[in-house]
Image (tube, rainbow, N blue to C red):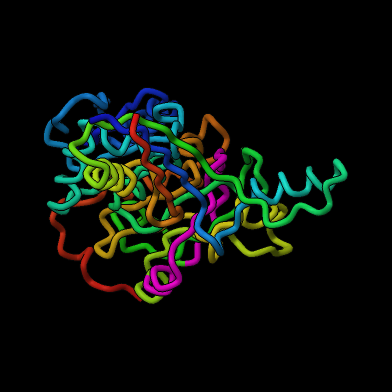
């Protein structure tokens, strides 16, 4: 059975939601404390949303140096899968496991609402259950969600097809304000080149249970549950 | 020797600084229309034990590169004084 470690930092608050979502798709999911040094043989690591270390200094800046993150760095370097959701995405950027950074929302306010995003890359561990171009409605809840990166980094992400989720441009189909935070290129989530490390600002774990009214985010979890570690398929370029 | 180091971390020029913009608008609303180019950063002070001033500065630069500033979005300036 696939083993999924959900890291709990002081200030994490979406850890149990992520744990339950991972359990629901039939994985052996468990919590790991930030001071632990072992992932206990996890195949997949989830860095959940929240406000680790109170967002002191910068969101994710201090969590990135917690003891468990050394294990996460090794795990990622060995081809293990890592999903960072919201604060987890911020931590992945601070840890240089993903490029760029997440800055204060352009509108300065904390944004908590559903948004429409388009799944653009599906050859990742966490999005294989979706089709390219699928539009999903999924909540965001963040104050520091504005993705920024150097121009050449943005060009590289686009050229390599590493934008996983993009806020849907304004359209009649979507009643929501596009791009809730001013992210460069409307980016809501990115991956590493191999598709094994993914960071996203929206919260799929909040829309992964029919009892909560929507399952648009369940695909992230059915995707990871279907992943076969070391699967070389993930390195084959798609599209 | 001990040194007091003042670190100023600022959002990189060219990046949108919504906090600076909001403060600038507030200043204008208060009648300070002459204020412009407002940017909001962060100041950090610390004591450092080091053999010399260049040693202290070099160590704090390492601290900045590793933790105190984000090289993707921020620049920093140091001032070192003997404590």
| A110 displayed left or right of A64 | right
Position in image of residue A49 (x %, y %): 43, 35
Q: Residue at x 32, y 27 (%)?
A: A8
**Figure label count:** 0
Position in image of residue A81 (x %, y %): 23, 48
| A133 displayed left or right of A45 | right
| A130 displayed left or right of A67 | right
Q: Residue at x 40, y 57 (%)?
A: B72
Q: Is residue B19 visible?
A: yes
Q: Residue A230: which quarter of the image?
A: bottom left
Q: Residue at x 40, y 27 (%)?
A: A53
Q: Residue A27 colored magenta?
A: no
Query: Is residue A203 shown above or below A236?
Result: above
Q: Residue B36: which quarter of the image?
A: bottom right
Position in image of residue B47 (x %, y %): 33, 29
Q: Residue at x 57, y 40 (%)?
A: A143
The quadrant of the picture occupied by the C terminus of chain B is: top left
The quadrant of the picture occupied by the N terminus of chain B is: top left
Q: Residue A127: which quarter of the image?
A: bottom left
> Of residues B7 and A13, which is closer to you in this image?
B7
Q: Residue A154 colored magenta?
A: yes
| A229 displayed left or right of B31 | left
Position in image of residue A207 (x %, y %): 50, 39
> Of residues A16 and B53, which is closer to you in this image?
B53
Q: Which residues are magenta?
A: A133-156
Q: Is residue A2 visible?
A: no
Query: Is residue A190 shown above or below A57?
Result: below
């Amino acid at each position: 059975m696939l083993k999924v470690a959900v890291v709990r930092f002081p200030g994490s608050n979406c850890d149990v939601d992520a744990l339950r979502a991972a359990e629901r798709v039939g994985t052996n999911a468990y919590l790991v404390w930030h001071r632990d040094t072992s992932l206990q043989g996890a195949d997949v690591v989830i860095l959940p949303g929240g406000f680790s270390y109170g967002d002191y200094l910068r969101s994710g800046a201090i969590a990135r140096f917690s003891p468990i993150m050394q294990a996460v760095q090794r795990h990622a370097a060995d081809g293990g899968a890592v999903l960072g959701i919201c604060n987890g995405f911020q931590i992945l950027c601070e840890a240089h496991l993903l490029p760029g950074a997440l800055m204060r929302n352009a509108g300065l306010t904390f944004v908590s609402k559903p948004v429409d995003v388009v799944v653009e890359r599906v050859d990742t561990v966490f999005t294989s259950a979706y089709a390219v171009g699928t539009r999903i409605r999924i909540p965001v809840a963040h104050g520091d969600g504005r993705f920024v990166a150097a121009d050449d980094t943005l060009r590289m992400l686009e050229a390599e097809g590493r934008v996983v989720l993009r806020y849907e441009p304004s359209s009649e189909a979507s009643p929501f304000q596009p791009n809730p935070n001013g992210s460069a290129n409307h980016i809501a989530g990115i991956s590493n080149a191999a598709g094994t490390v993914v960071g996203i600002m929206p919260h799929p774990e909040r829309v992964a249970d029919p009892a909560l009214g929507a399952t648009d985010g369940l695909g992230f979890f059915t995707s990871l549950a279907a992943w076969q570690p070391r699967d070389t398929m993930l390195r084959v370029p798609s599209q | 020797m001990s040194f007091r180091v003042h670190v100023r971390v600022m959002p990189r020029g060219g990046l949108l600084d919504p906090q600076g913009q909001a403060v600038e608008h507030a200043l204008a609303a208060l009648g300070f229309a002459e204020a412009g180019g407002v940017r909001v950063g962060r100041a950090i002070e610390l004591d450092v034990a080091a053999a010399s001033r260049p040693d202290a500065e070099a160590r704090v630069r390492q601290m900045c590169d590793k933790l105190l500033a984000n090289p993707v979005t921020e620049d920093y300036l140091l001032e070192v004084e003997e404590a």
